[in-house]
């Protein structure tokens, strides 16, 4: 346990990782501020000293994880012309599906957290829309290089891929980690052709 009054390095990430372990081990119902701080090895009041409450903490956790995922997807257009289109789309899909369904589901089951996440996304925080934009930009770049057919509707393709990822992530049982990518691999082939 960290001594009282001593700054904890990377506290937010430490608390976020602890929350993910609590949810993975005991389910969403077990997530309390006390469970998180005990798992993180911090004083009981640390979470409330840095967040207005558990709902704000959950929302920030979900937004943080989506920001990391969207940042990874943002690099996608720079990969145009190298590797394979199928491989790059599969990589982005794997990154999205690596989000913990139990943690993402927390924001759905906690109305105040869900509202905060939705408002943040509407205000421009990175989420599924940022991933979709990156996929569309990437496919346009590949189209310009002749590696994706001219007739491909890249915006609809990006929507189909990210919409499917959203569906798989939001409907996966919390104990189904990692989410299988077999369906996604088939979808990518159906959308852009064989690898």
Image (spheres, rainbow, N blue to C red):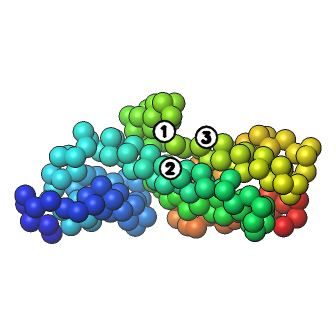
Percent from the top left, x then y, of residue 130? 59, 43
Side of 49 where 77 appears, left or right: right
SS at circle 2: helix
Q: Give the residue displayed 48% in from the left and 30% down from the top.
A: 123
Q: Quadrant of residue 43?
A: bottom left
Q: Which mark is residue 66?
A: 2
Residue 85 in view in this figure:
yes
Residue 125: numbered disc:
1
x, y (%) of residue 2?
Answer: 14, 66
Please tell me which residue is depicted at 69% across the width and 60% down the height of the picture.
79
**Of the image marks 1 and 2, the number of the one nearer the N terminus:** 2
SS category of the residue bearing label 3: helix
Left/right placement of residue 23 relative to residue 33 reads right
Q: Which mark is residue 129?
A: 3
Depth check: give the residue in front, 75 or 97.
75
Which of marks 2 and 3 precedes in the sequence? 2
Confirm or deny contact between disc 1 and disc 2 (CB under 8 A).
Answer: yes
């Amino acid at each position: 346990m960290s001594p009282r009054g001593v700054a904890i390095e990377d506290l937010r990430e430490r608390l976020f990782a602890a929350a993910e372990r609590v949810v993975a081990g005991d389910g969403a119902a077990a997530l309390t501020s006390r469970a998180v701080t005990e798992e993180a090895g911090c004083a009981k009041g640390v979470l409330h000293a840095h967040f207005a409450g558990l709902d704000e903490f959950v929302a920030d956790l979900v937004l943080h994880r989506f920001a990391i995922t969207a940042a990874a997807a943002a690099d996608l257009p720079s990969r145009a012309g190298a590797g394979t289109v199928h491989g790059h789309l599969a990589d982005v899909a794997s990154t999205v599906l690596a989000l913990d369904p139990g943690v993402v589901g927390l924001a759905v089951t906690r109305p105040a957290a869900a509202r905060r996440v939705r408002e943040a996304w509407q205000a421009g925080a990175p989420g599924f829309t940022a991933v979709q934009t990156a996929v569309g930009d990437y496919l346009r770049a590949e189209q310009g290089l002749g590696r994706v057919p001219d007739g491909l509707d890249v915006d609809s393709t990006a929507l189909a891929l990210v919409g499917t990822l959203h569906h798989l992530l939001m409907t996966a049982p919390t104990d189904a980690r990692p989410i299988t990518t077999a369906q996604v691999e088939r979808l990518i082939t159906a959308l852009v052709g064989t690898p």
